[in-house]
Image (tube, grey):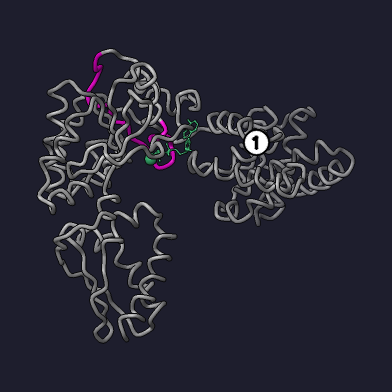
């Protein structure tokens, strides 16, 4: 294979990778790779440092193999060779810069690591303008983290150092960090805030090492009022970076500067982190964000629907809050999809369109439902006690919900009529049969009842 062909293949693979892992991860980790040669079934690629090699080996090698193999069937493996590149192009420098928010101008400045500080002019703000405190919905799962974030943002002197926010993906860590930054700048525009991901921190550090520019590197980090590093779980395991991080951390704390960190786990649970660093991280305030509750999801959906200016019926909002439980990001994504669809086709937003548009997402959440879950959900929905599913009470206020539950049990599970009867306080199978018939009849004549049943059914199918 000649080098031109090889280049073409590589550029196709790069496009695919960009799409797979995102522009910024690609820029940081894979762009510096270059193809050396193909020998037999192996393609060898150069990477600029041992650190990069380890990182790519740990995170991207399988994907690279697959993509190469798709592109050139004879290629079975990918090897990484460390080759230091002595000269950096201006483009390289461009890519490695990060962002300092310079409050005095209310703008964000970009400054290169290699001494050419603040010479690049202004660029788009890296802080997300949507991520402010007033756009953050507070509920039980996040109220503590929210309160801690507000405290740090509003305090005149550092109240706790560091503030360590942790929680699962998509639960609002980045949002809260951005909100702190906005608030601090609003109160005192002269403060310098640096916000970056741990990945970027490491990447910059590695580049600085390679260019023997660590003094400038340290300078930059140690001259800020507030340092925020997002997703520090990525720092674990890489000794030199951890070391640098530890020193930067101590230097800033000693100078009374505020540090805010986020991770997907608590400091003690973070893997591959040195003990002294762990105990340092535990010194400040550790605040966790718990998984969302139904109430929080409802509140978030209501706010976002209003922001999107869509008229979402209560039933749709409730349906989404019941169905999309993984995290806020997914919830938001689902609402955006539904909104975009209804606006595009100009159709009214109903439960049906919602289910149609999200069918792939919803199917992914599908699982088998049990009679117990049906009883619980139906009891909640009609506001009766769970015990009344089994009780002998016959008043209509409990008998009707019970019939709905039996009907749903027949529809959604593979249980036989006698089995269902037994689960409802040992009732006879003819009672179940009667319930199914009754609910069917009512659905035909009472559309709001029919909708109730439909809603319950969809919720339970989650
Ligand atoms: P993380 O950094 O924890 O992975 P993000 O902060 O990026 O999560 O949040 C994911 C998305 O969900 C963002 O669009 C964010 O605005 C939104 N989000 C998360 N929590 C809330 C909340 N409590 N109120 C409003 N939006 C939220
Ligand atoms: Mg985040």
Quick one: quadrant of the N terminus? bottom left
Q: Nearer the viewer, residue 247 or 436?
A: 247
Give the labeled residue for mark 1: 317
Q: Is mark 1 within 8 Å of ligand 1?
A: no
Q: Residue at x 14, y 37 (%)?
A: 218
Find the magenta span and give its range: 157-175
Tell me if residue 262 can be seen. no
Tell me if residue 257 can be seen. yes
Q: Residue at x 56, y 43 (%)?
A: 324
Residue 35 position (above or below residue 450): below
Element type where label 1 sits in the image? helix
Say which quarter of the image contains residue 117: top left
The answer to whether 47 appears left or right of 17 in the picture is left
Q: Is residue 159 magenta?
A: yes
- Residue 441 in picture, x, y percent from top left: 87, 44
Residue 287 position (above or below residue 27): above
Q: Residue at x 67, y 36 (%)?
A: 378
Q: Nearer the viewer, residue 34 or 76?
A: 34
- Residue 315 in picture, x, y percent from top left: 70, 36
- Residue 305 in picture, x, y percent from top left: 63, 33
The answer to whether 446 appears left or right of 209 in the picture is right
Residue extending farthest top: 156
Q: Residue at x 30, y 61 (%)?
A: 30
- Residue 372 in picture, x, y percent from top left: 59, 42
The answer to whether 384 appears left or right of 242 in the picture is right
- How many numbered callouts? 1
Q: Nearer the viewer, residue 69 or 352?
A: 69
- How packed is label 1: few (under 14 Cα within 10 Å), some, or many (20 or more)? many
Q: Nearer the viewer, residue 225 or 154?
A: 225
Say which quarter of the image contains residue 57: bottom left
Q: Is residue 4 magenta?
A: no
């Amino acid at each position: 294979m000649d080098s031109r062909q090889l280049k073409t293949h590589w550029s196709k693979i790069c496009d695919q990778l960009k799409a797979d892992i995102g522009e910024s991860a690609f820029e940081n980790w894979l762009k510096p790779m270059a193809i050396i040669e193909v020998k037999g079934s192996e393609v060898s690629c150069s990477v600029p440092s041992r650190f990069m090699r380890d990182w790519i080996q740990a995170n991207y090698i399988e994907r690279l193999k697959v993509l190469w193999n798709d592109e050139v069937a004879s290629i079975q493996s990918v090897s990484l060779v460390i080759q230091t590149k002595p000269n950096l192009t201006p483009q390289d420098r461009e890519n490695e810069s990060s962002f300092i928010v310079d409050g005095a101008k209310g703008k964000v400045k970009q400054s290169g690591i290699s001494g050419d500080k603040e010479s690049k002019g202004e660029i788009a703000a890296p802080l997300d303008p949507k991520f402010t405190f007033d756009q953050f919905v507070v509920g039980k799962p996040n109220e503590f983290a929210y309160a801690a974030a507000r405290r740090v943002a509003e305090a005149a002197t550092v109240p706790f150092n560091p503030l360590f926010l942790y929680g699962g993906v998509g639960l609002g860590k980045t949002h809260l960090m951005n909100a702190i930054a906005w608030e601090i700048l609003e109160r005192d525009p002269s403060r310098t805030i640096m916000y970056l991901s741990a990945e970027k921190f490491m990447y910059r550090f590695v580049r600085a090492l390679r260019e023997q520019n660590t003094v400038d590197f340290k300078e930059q980090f140690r001259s800020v009022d507030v340092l925020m590093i997002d997703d520090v779980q990525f720092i674990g395991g890489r000794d030199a970076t951890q070391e640098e991080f530890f020193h930067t951390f101590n230097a800033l704390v000693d100078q009374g500067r505020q540090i805010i960190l986020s991770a997907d786990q608590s400091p003690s649970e973070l893997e591959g982190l040195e003990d002294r660093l762990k105990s340092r991280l535990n010194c400040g305030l550790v605040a966790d964000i718990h998984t969302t509750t139904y109430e929080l999801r409802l509140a978030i959906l209501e706010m976002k629907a209003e922001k999107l200016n869509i008229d979402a019926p209560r039933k749709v909002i409730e349906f989404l809050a019941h169905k999309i439980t993984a995290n806020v990001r997914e919830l938001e994504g689902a609402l955006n999809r539904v909104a975009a669809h209804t606006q595009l086709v100009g159709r009214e937003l109903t439960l049906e369109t919602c289910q149609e548009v999200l069918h792939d997402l919803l199917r992914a959440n599908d699982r088998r439902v049990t009679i117990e879950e049906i009883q619980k959900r139906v009891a909640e929905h009609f506001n009766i006690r769970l015990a009344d599913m089994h009780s002998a009470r016959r008043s209509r206020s409990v008998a009707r919900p019970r019939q709905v539950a039996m009907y749903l049990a027949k529809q959604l599970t593979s249980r036989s009529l006698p089995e269902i009867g037994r689960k409802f306080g040992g009732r006879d199978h003819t009672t179940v049969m009667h319930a199914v018939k009754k609910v069917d009849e009512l659905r035909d004549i009472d559309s709001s009842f029919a909708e109730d049943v439909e809603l319950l059914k969809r919720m339970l199918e989650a």
